[in-house]
Amino acid sequence: MTISVCNLARSIQNRQTSALEVISQTLAEIEAKNRHLNCFTDILQPRALAQAQKIDQAIAKSEPVGVLAGIPFAVKNLFDIKGIVTLAGSKINRDHPAAGQDAIAIQTLEAAGAVLVGATNMDEYAYGFVTENAHYG
C-alpha cells in the first residue's frame, strides 16, 4: 500500500497510527531489504526510534509537532550526521572522525518533525550516475 506524505503525516497527527509504528515498520523494511540492495551505509535505529517516541509523546500531550511529524527520511552519506563518519562514498574518509553535528538540511527536516532513519550508499563524492560504489558496493 502506498500513502502520500501529507496523508501519512495527518494520520500520525490524528493518532490513527503512531510515529513509532511508522518508523518501526520503515526500519524493518530497511533491515529486510538492505542485505540484498546495499542501499544504506548506516541505519540509525536507536536515534530514529527515540525521535518517534518523542513525537508520539508530544502528540499525546497536544503539543505542537512539525508538519512532517513521524515521516521517515534518509540522506546520502554525503551529509554530516552527528556521530557518524561522513564517507561520501570514499574509502579515504572511513578513518575520519565522526561528524560533530548534523548538516543544516537534516536539522531543518527534523525541526519539521521528520525522522532520520539512515545514511545511504552513493557514488564516490557524488561523482557518477550508476550508484555502484567501487568501495562499498
Image: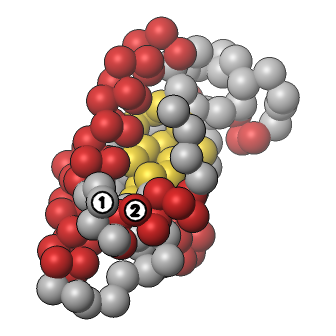
State the separation of the CA atoms marked 1 and 2: 5 Å
Where 134 sits versus 93, above or below?
above
Query: Label 2 sits on what residue type?
Result: Ser
Where 119 sits versus 134, above or below?
below
Residue 67 in picture, x, y percent from top left: 49, 77
Residue 133 in picture, x, y percent from top left: 66, 21
- Label 1: few (<14), some (14–19) or many (≥20) C-alpha neighbours in 10 Å: few
On the rendered image, what quadrant is the C terminus found in? top right
59 vs 43, left or right, is left
The numbered disc on residue 11 is 2
105 vs 97, left or right, is right
The numbered disc on residue 119 is none
Residue at the far bottom: name it.
63
Residue 42 or residue 56, whichever sits in front: 56
Residue drawn at the location 51% of the way across and 33% of the way down:
1
- Evaluate if marks 1 and 2 touch, with contact meaning CB atoms under 8 Å apart: yes
Where 115 sits versus 28, above or below?
below
Residue 91 or residue 39, whichever sits in front: 39
Residue at the far top: name it.
36
Residue 14 in picture, x, y percent from top left: 34, 71
Q: Secondary structure at mark 1?
A: loop
Residue 104 in picture, x, y percent from top left: 56, 75
Residue 127 or residue 93, whichever sits in front: 127
Residue drawn at the location 84% of the way across and 29% of the way down:
129
- Label 2: few (<14), some (14–19) or many (≥20) C-alpha neighbours in 10 Å: some
Q: Which residue is mark 1?
A: 16
- The reply to whether residue 50 is in sight is yes
Q: Secondary structure at mark 2?
A: helix
Query: Label 1 sits on what residue type?
Result: Gln
